[in-house]
Amino acid sequence: MFEIFGIPSTALFGQLLIGLINGSFYALLSLGLAVIFGMLNIINFTHGAQYMMGAFAAFILLDLTGLGYWPALIIAPIVVGITGMIIERTMLQWLYKLDHLYGLLLTFGLALIIEGVARNYYGSAGLPYQLPESLTGGQNLGFMFLPNYRAWVIIASLAVCLGTWFVIERTKLGAYLRAATENPTLVRAFGINVPRMITLTYGFGVALAAFAGVMAAPIYNVSPQMGSSLIIVVFAVVVIGGMGSILGSIVTGLGLGLIEGLTKVFYPEASSTVIFVIMAIVLLIRPSGLFGKGA
């Protein structure tokens, strides 16, 4: 074992790994927020609750039906995404032309309701979720031990994030989505159903949150407050990256996760606030965010 700046290599790389895992969740969640804000112009405060719903959906599938992690990774995002589309059709669609504050208040209220219902049925204590057998164990890299499941989380998050970025930025579907945001009247003239596209986009953003929740379930205990404790940090990530910026949310989420991990090694007292300090500095220098349209 060797040392880097007086820190044992195992401790340093271990914290970097934790930071990268946290960054993977930040990237996935902030990506969903960026997709929703960029398309719908809604600040979705329900996102943390929908992340929690994904984890609980996986837990319920295992508890009631015996379906394990891999089926839940597909079923839970679809189910939670459908609930998101119902919310968009019944509530959010009436707020698009109003001030952001109305959407924020509605989604914040919905988040409190969802969290309250989960707490009423399952209590506040965390519920364990079993690791999939195929991803137990780990690899000894010499300078650190890498658990297989944590490696899977990082790889899967990167694949989903980059795939989403490619679809939105490099395909015809993504061009339609961006055009519908800029000029919905023109897009309607080409025979495209803009309201349906918006509904599906919101559902996809919600499904991303649920997907992150399923992946988080074996690492963290499944609890009603798991989303509320994370969403504030994720909003800070979105602001730093630039509201509505797909690439910004991915790069910033992973980068801030690593910075948070390094801070835990060199200055642990600041690890819980370093992201917000960076946010304040970025807002002073570049108010639109690092990758925002005004950057």
Image (cartoon, grey):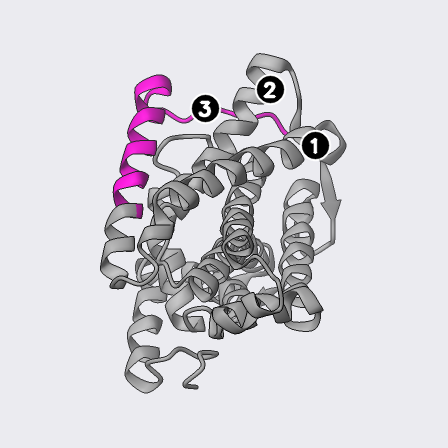
Residue 124 is one of the magenta-drawn residues: yes
Of callouts 3 and 1, which one flags the residue occurring earlier in the amino acid sequence? 1
Give how far across and how far down residue 53 sits, in percent.
46, 34
Give how far across and how far down residue 164 sits, in percent.
64, 60
Q: How many marks?
A: 3
Give how far across and how far down residue 294 sits, in percent.
41, 85
Extent of the magenta region? 107-131
Magenta: main secondary structure? helix
The residue that disc 3 covers is: 127
The residue that disc 1 covers is: 70
The residue type indicated by label 2 comes to Leu
Disc 2 is placed on an element classified as helix
Q: Residue at x 32, y 52 (%)?
A: 94
The residue type indicated by label 1 comes to Trp
| Crowd around label 1: few <14 · some 14–19 · many ≥20 (10 Å) | few
Q: Residue at x 60, y 61 (%)?
A: 192
The residue type indicated by label 3 comes to Leu
